[in-house]
Amino acid sequence: MENNALNFRSNELFLIAGPCAVESENQLRTILMNENRPRLIRGGIHKMRTNAKSFQGMGDEGMEIVKKMKKEIPFDFITEVTDARQIEALLPITSVFQVGARNMYNYELLKELSRYGRPVILKRAFSATISEWLGAAEYLFNLGEKNIILCERGVRSFDNKLRNLLDLGSVIYLKKNTPFKIIVDPSHSMGLTPYVADAAYAAVAAGADGLIVEVHPEPAVALSDGQQALNIPQFDEMVQKLHKLAPIFGKELRM
Ligand code: PEP
Ligand code: MN
């Protein structure tokens, strides 16, 4: 897949899963050993944390782990690029770049990314209107519609019970009014493990083209976002249900 578009087909529900951040060889290997694992694996190398004292990602060491694991078990890798200076180093291991919510308005980063021809998942910023989000997507114009994937990851609201407010209205609207593929991140939307799978099912019903979900072999010891990670049995259960649910909405789960 390395240099191609994600090649989404309209009858496919595309699943992406993996840890919030790459933490160790063991962690990644355990996820990759799961026979239910998707082909496209997420994993933060450079993290944009709200607190400067929080784990910032493994950086170069994380890239080495991904390189080594790719030789053991082939997979496509998606990771967030938090600064344009990381792009060249990430290119050899990255099939799809992710622009995080905190960087949606970083137009210089978007312009730079648009030069590489690699698909980009553009997350919605915390308080971005749909128009602002589409405006940001315009900066990726050179990539063409096929290589730009919008990701709804929940927005700020007046409520604080959940991490964010999963705006499925945006998914419904974007599917009907734009050519872009749209995926949903139920992990960052809900912020708590027990709600993630149900939010994923709701996203399918809203017409999402895909899902990006955080999975960790041992969420209790995760260095970031453990409170919203599915463990492997929980992930497997979700996958089984998605296999059954997708056809109701005219899709087939693509791993
Ligand atoms: C992430 O995907 O780990 C992440 C930081 O997401 P967001 O940018 O949506 O907060
Ligand atoms: Mn995360």
Image: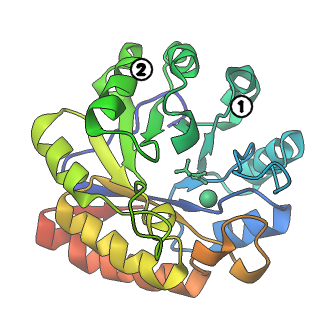
Quarter the C terminus occupies: bottom left
Say which of 86 and 160 sits in front.
160
Percent from the top left, x then y, of residue 172? 16, 52
Q: Is residue 229 visible?
A: no
Is residue 235 positioned above or below 4 on the image? below
Is residue 140 positioned above or below 207 on the image? above
Q: Which mark is residue 51?
A: none
Q: Nearer the viewer, mark 2 or mark 1?
A: 2
Say which of 175 and 35 sits in front.
175
Disc 2 secondary structure class: loop
Percent from the top left, x then y, of residue 239? 41, 76
Q: Which residue matches tag 2?
A: 140
Say which of 175 and 52 sits in front.
52
> In this image, 48 relative to 16: left or right?
right
Disc 1 crowd rating (10 Å Cα; few below 14, some 14-19, many 20+) is some
Q: Is residue 20 visible?
A: yes
Is residue 59 positioned above or below 119 on the image? below
> In this image, 3 relative to 30: left or right?
left
The answer to which quarter of the image holds residue 254 is: bottom left
Disc 2 crowd rating (10 Å Cα; few below 14, some 14-19, many 20+) is many
Q: Is the residue marked 1 within 8 Å of ligand 1, measured from its CB?
A: no
Q: Which residue matches tag 1?
A: 90
